[in-house]
Amino acid sequence: MKNRHRIRLPQIDFSKESESDVYFVLDSENGSEKFRFHDYDRIFAIPGLYEQIFYDRLKCDSPRFLAERLNAVITRAGERVSGQRVLDFGAGNGMMGEALARHGVSRMVGVDISAVARDALERDRPGLYDDYCVADLSRPDPAVMEELQRWHFSCLTTVAALGYNDIPESALREAFNLVEDGGWIAFNVKETFLGKSDGDDFSGLVKRLLAGESLHLHHLERYQHRISVEGNPLYYYAAIGRKMAPWPEAD
């Protein structure tokens, strides 16, 4: 039976607050508990809570949307998405992997820094990935990197994991460079990361990647990622391209 929880959103207007300050309240027989949206380990530890708040309540659509667009782009290029060897970076509890599996992708490896996310994946979606590595790619373990390199990945996906200091630039670069040249790169970013309204380091990183020589962009599309707690649409960009060369370290 699907787990259902008593979730309350506060009366506070979060529209002008930082994403890291947004929270919801979980009521249970043990009392009420506050969860910030980026308290992923605490959320993943409770079966069904992540899906209920972000997918049922706030209508997150990114895994489905990005998987569909990736399938379309690869098909237009005369290839089969089912034949890809996918590295799902920032895999969490497997929402993107599940979306890819619906399109026939059978070879997938998940990587996430969180052991709690891995445990949630094994609890809720056992057998979805061929392997799942708990690793910090900003400080890569040589043995882990050697094991990942053996997969000869042809595709990298990372969904709702970039920005907000969740993944450092060095970790994203390591994941990018695990994909063989000519492989596919698919990710999403908040719309302000590509606009003038956001001047942080990650915004600059994304712009450099899209404008550089390591990635040839095939598809860029603005779409509704989910709604906010106020019910307003939150827009992201889906970016899909081919890896043309290794992503060099910044000078």
Image: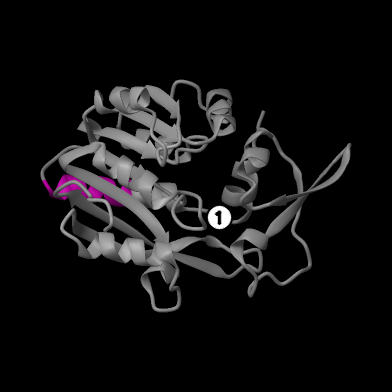
Residue identifier under label 1? 59
Residue at 42% of width from left, 48% of height from top? 159
215 on left or right of 120? left
Q: Nearer the viewer, residue 105 or 152?
A: 152
In the figure, 63 relative to 100: above or below?
Answer: below
Residue type at tag 1: Lys
Dot 1 alpha-carbon crowd within 10 angstroms: few under 14, some 14 to 19, many 20 or more: some
Residue at 65% of width from left, 70% of height from top? 17
The magenta segment: 67-77
In magenta segment, residue 214? no
Q: Residue furthest left?
A: 78
In magenta segment, residue 69? yes
Q: Position of residue 187 (x, y in %)?
A: 35, 52
Give the overall secondary structure of the magenta segment: helix
Looking at the rendering, in which quadrant would you find the C terminus? Answer: bottom left
Examine the image and state in which quarter residue 211 appears.
bottom left
